Image (tube, rainbow, N blue to C red):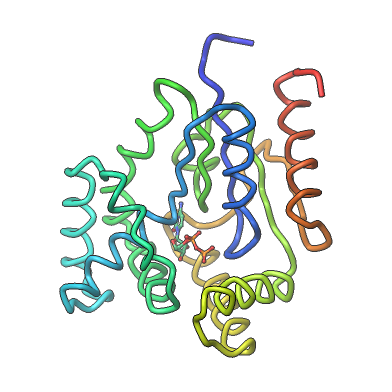
Amino acid sequence: MTGRPLVIAIDGPAAAGKGTLARRLAEHFGLPHLDTGLLYRAVARGMLDRGEDPADAEAAERTARALDAKELDASELARPDLRTPEVDRAASIVAARPAVRAALRAFQRRFPAERGAVMDGRDIGTVIFPEATVKLYVTASPEARAERRWRELTGRGIAVERAEIAAEIAERDTQDQSRPVGRLVKAEGAVTLDTTDLDPEAAFAAALAAVNAHIGAQP
Ligand code: CDP
């Protein structure tokens, strides 16, 4: 091992289970965790709060710059209203803007500098931290992802149709894979983890094994 801090980069499509996995890995290794989707969600939330159109490119860039300038204080990313279907849609629109992505890049680059980190998103292993110690590409079938997202939302009392969620996930996949900047692709050297048939415990065990194999640690 070199003296560099441990950085675990986790990328993958919507509702693949990255968040749960990232939190558990962070806890296991005693690392800070950054869910980078929250950055795009916070930009979207701020715009919606002010009655701005998420498709307004200038307003999106301005919001992202303001967020970055505030050093993204934790309370902003801990807001409970960042995970609503309305924010899902708006975040997907603002995340496709190169200027928004550029405004949020420096913060993400700095995040692991001192203590290392587990970071999850779409372009961590490809753009933000290509030198990460370990890269995981976490995926699952569209059906499994739609089912999980539906359960999560209905469990939080948000009334949504299964079919509507499936359609939105499909739309987000298209958006994630087709935008010119920050496109979701498997990073070079990433380990693929398909969680379609894995519960959170089994997914964690598989991820941990992959990380340990990479850093040469004992299981
Ligand atoms: O899992 P889900 O897509 O619902 O949510 P998320 O991971 O919190 O991502 C929210 C939005 O931000 C999505 O539209 C992603 O495409 C986008 N995102 C991104 O563009 N880059 C990242 N590093 C993380 C999220």
Please state the horizontal and vertical placement of residue 125, each as a whole percent of the image. 55, 40
Along the horizontal axis of the image, is 217 left or right of 177? right
Asked which quadrant contains residue 166, the reply is bottom right
- Relative placement, left or right, of 177 versus 108 is right
Q: Which percent across, then down, holds residue 50?
A: 16, 73
Residue name at image x 73 percent, y 71 percent: 144
Closer to the camera, 158 or 127? 158
| Image position of 42 with respect to 47: above or below | above
Quadrant in which residue 41 is drawn: bottom left
Residue 75 lies, with reference to residue 43, above or below; the image says: above
Which quarter of the image is occupied by the C terminus?
A: top right
Q: Residue 155 occupies which quadrant of the picture?
A: bottom right
- Residue at 66 percent across and 42 percent down: it is 136
Q: Position of residue 195 (x, y in %)?
A: 76, 57
Position of 214 with respect to 80 (left or right) is: right
Residue drawn at x 28%, y 56% is 100
Q: Quadrant of the N terminus?
A: top right
Name the residue at 45% across, 42% down.
Answer: 34
186 shown above or below 150: above
